[in-house]
Image (cartoon, helix red, strand yellow):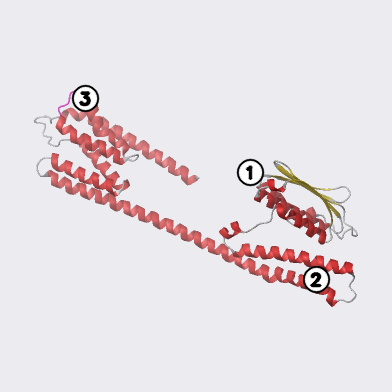
Amino acid sequence: MVQGATRLVRGRGIDVLIGVVTVTLYAVAWPTLHLTHQVSYPVQPVVAALAAWPFVLVRANAALGWAISAVSALVIPWAFDLVPDSGYTYPWQVVHIIVIMTLLLSVSLTAGPPTVAVAWVSTVLLFLADTPGDDGVGWAVGLSALVVFGLLVRWLVLSRRQLAAEEQTSELERARRAILEEKARIARDLHDVVAHHMSMVVVQAQSAPYRLGAVSDEARAEFESIGATAREALNEIRGLLGVLRSDAEAVERAPQPGAAQIAELLDGSRRAGIALSCNVAGDPDVLSELSGLTVYRILQESLANAARHCPGAAVTVALDYGPAVTSLLVVNGPAAVPAGAAQRPESSGGSGIGGMRERAAAVGGTLDTRVLGDGGFEVAARVPNTPLA
């Protein structure tokens, strides 16, 4: 933004300078016109304007300015004679020659090759035809050198711009590689530590009924629930590892949970032993993918907090898919364990509550939490069905 403002100020400064130069050239051309050409006084301002004012287009439209200047240079010698015995032999004023040369240089710097060729050949022929004596050849050589100089400068500027763009691309690619390498390192660490231990939990839970004698049906069901929950967690970790090991485009295409998976999340929480009751109203299809993902993650974190910090507590979930805003309320009672064994989410030192607030705010929603009088905890979220732009 700062660079754009700087370029805008610089461009306006150049435009002001061009305007000042144009006015100066006109102020020179008009009073001196009667010294070189036989022009009546009422027509002098017009002829002087044809000589000087095309310069104002040197930056905005050099090709148009050159065309106006070249046509006037073709007409003026035919329409107006030189002043006899003035000693001036050129068919145009000096101001006119300066302007047409400047515009030709600007055309060679900015216009396309066909336009440059037309402007170059036409100007050379104009000077060969109208300049006195053998001066036309010298002017032809000088004008050709001027065009070649402009093309060389143009090529140099374009080459430097391309080089700068390639360097910027290389720098971005190096930064992208560094990010991918760091993500790959994190993925390896997660796989070696977290995924390994989660796999061991699954194996232990599945094999416990066979390794331990006299396992009751309740204990067997509990082991199965632990194994199912651990497998779900392991699947999510594998999905996270896939995200870390892929590039940004693959991440955008990767499937994410949403409103359609909320029922599975609730069932999984029940299997994990949470005394869960829920009241769901409305149509989940009204949520966009991003809003559905937000609701899912907030509910997932709320249930995880309830199980972690208030084990054994009853949990109530109220979910209302409204026409414009989805409301989510998760309330858990006090922990069904001795005092001190559980910990409230806000005082645990984790980042779950902050993460939920950030998710809600990212889509234009809100999230409020509070500790209840009986020692329980409440999470209330409102998520727009369509994220704010």
Query: Mark 2 sits on what residue?
Result: 205
Mark-to-mark CA distance, 3 and 1: 64 Å
Q: Position of residue 37 (x, y in %)?
A: 15, 30
Query: Mark 3 sits on what residue?
Result: 43
Report crowding for label 2: few under 14, some 14 to 19, many 20 or more residues within 10 A (C-alpha).
many
For label 2, the SS is helix
Q: Position of residue 175 (x, y in %)?
A: 53, 61
Q: Quadrant of residue 69?
A: top left
For label 3, the SS is loop
For label 1, the SS is loop
Task: Write the start and end of the magenta stretch as one range.
Answer: 37-43
Vertical placement of residue 49 versus 102, above or below = above
Vertical placement of residue 74 versus 299, above or below = above
Type of secondary structure dominating the magenta stretch: loop
In the drawing, does residue 186 fall left or right of residue 77? right
> Which residue type does callout 2 highlight?
Ala
In the drawing, does residue 378 fall left or right of residue 293? right
Mark-to-mark CA distance, 3 and 2: 104 Å
Query: Mark 1 sits on what residue?
Result: 388
- Mark on residue 270? none
Mark-to-mark CA distance, 1 and 2: 44 Å
Give the mark nearest the N terminus, 1 or 2.
2
Vertical placement of residue 228 versus 64, above or below = below
Q: Quadrant of residue 255?
A: bottom right
